[in-house]
Image (cartoon, helix red, strand yellow):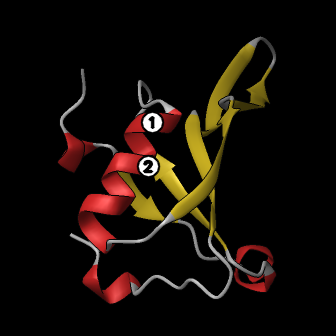
Amino acid sequence: MIAIQDVLIQPIVTEKTVAMKDKFCFAVHGDATKDDVKKALLDFYGAKVLKVNITNLPEKFKQVQRGKQARKRAPLKKATITLAKGGTLDFNAFK
């Protein structure tokens, strides 16, 4: 079981995520479930969550020499949260 304060790591703010209406993306703990994410958002932001989608992004490697690889990106678990219509989150209030 993960402590609620450890579930949300940081918000992911890119051009693509900003353009989504009523949806927000967060990097979450590797063992977090959809219910954990919902509880954490309710606890930190008081937001009503309609839906949570979780995506596991694998680590990526870049080949630097013959037979040798360097890690380009660490593995990441990303949660896309759909809020009720007109719902917003204030990222300045994050933890």
Q: Whole-percent x and y of residue 6?
A: 24, 44
In depth, the one of 48 and 88 nearer the eye is: 48
Q: Whole-percent x and y of residue 23?
A: 68, 70
Image-based side of 65 in relation to 40, left or right: right
Q: Residues within 10 Å of mark 1 (few under 14, many from 20)?
A: few
Quarter of the view holding residue 30: top left
Give SS at disc 2.
helix
Q: Which residue is at 18% across, 36% downward?
A: 3
Q: Which residue is at 69% across, 78% downward?
A: 22
For the residues labelled 2 and 1, say whether their Cβ atoms are less than 8 Å apart: yes
Q: Is residue 69 above or below residue 42?
A: above
Which numbered tag is attached to residue 69? Answer: none
Quarter of the view holding residue 74: top right
Which numbered tag is attached to residue 38? Answer: 2
Image-based side of 64 in relation to 89, left or right: right
- Residue under pointer 1: 35
In depth, the one of 48 and 4 nearer the eye is: 48
- Location of the C terminus (image quadrant): bottom left
Q: Which residue is at 24% across, 20% downward?
A: 1
Q: Whole-percent x and y of residue 75?
A: 57, 33
Give SS at disc 1.
helix
Q: Residues within 10 Å of mark 2 (few under 14, many from 20)?
A: some
Whole-angstrom CA distance, mark 2 to mark 1, is: 5 Å
Question: What amino acid type should be assigned to the residue bearing mark 1?
Answer: Asp
Q: Is residue 45 above or below residue 36?
A: below
Question: What amino acid type should be assigned to the residue bearing mark 2?
Answer: Lys
